[in-house]
Image (cartoon, grey):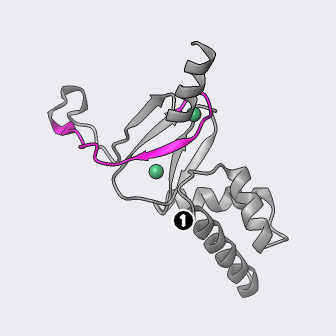
């Protein structure tokens, strides 16, 4: 690969990563693409997807499946759980959830655990209020 191409790819990957890091909204690839495009006008959606896959593989970002059935991305790797609203789809960080000791779980004996995830689902405060106002 030509040096210039490699430099461009490295730069695009850094912009993709910085874009995810700049927000706590757990954005989708489409949202990231729009943001990256304002900085790198010639970037394609395919390039953004490829960079997301590389960043995920190297462990720089994590992927969360939303209630909208789309992949969302998070560059905050500190231990935290997520609350996902089933109405508006927003994903909130939940701090202070103690990790469970999976070594005591008999079905996990012999399995190599690489990640422990916690997702909560339900209605966020705003959607919960809206639902009550509508009477359900
Ligand atoms: Zn909501
Ligand atoms: Zn998060």
- Relative to 8, 62 lies left or right: left
- In the image shown, does 97 or 41 lie closer to the viewer? 97
Extreme-right residue of the structure: 42
- Against 126, is 22 above or below? below
Question: From this viewpoint, is residue 78 visible?
Answer: yes
Extreme-top residue of the structure: 136
- For label 1, the residue is 21
Extreme-front residue of the structure: 133
- In the image shown, does 112 or 83 lie closer to the viewer? 83
- Against 26, is 85 above or below? above
Residue 13's quadrant in the figure? bottom right
- Against 109, is 10 above or below? below
- Relative to 24, 8 lies left or right: right
Q: Which residues are magenta?
A: 85-103
> For the residue labelled by badge 1, is the local secondary structure a helix, a strand or a loop?
helix
Q: Main secondary structure of the magenta part?
A: loop
Percent position of residue 23, x then y: 57, 60
- Against 7, is 119 above or below? above
Percent position of residue 80, x then y: 36, 49
Percent position of residue 111, x then y: 27, 38
Crowd tier of the residue under label 1, counting other residues whose Cα lies within 10 Å: few below 14, some 14–19, many 20 or above: some
């Amino acid at each position: 690969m030509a040096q210039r191409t490699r430099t461009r790819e490295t730069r695009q990957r850094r912009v993709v990563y910085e874009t995810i890091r700049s927000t706590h909204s757990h954005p989708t690839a489409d949202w990231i693409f729009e943001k990256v495009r304002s900085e790198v006008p010639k970037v394609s959606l395919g390039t953004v997807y490829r960079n997301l896959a590389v960043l995920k593989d190297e462990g720089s970002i994590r992927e969360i499946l939303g209630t909208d059935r789309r992949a969302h991305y998070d560059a905050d790797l500190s231990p935290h759980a997520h609350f996902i609203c089933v109405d508006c789809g927003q994903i909130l960080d939940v701090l202070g959830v103690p990790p469970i000791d999976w070594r005591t779980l008999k079905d996990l004996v012999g399995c190599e655990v690489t990640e422990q995830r916690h997702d909560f689902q339900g209605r966020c405060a705003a959607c919960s209020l809206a639902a009550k106002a509508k009477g359900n």
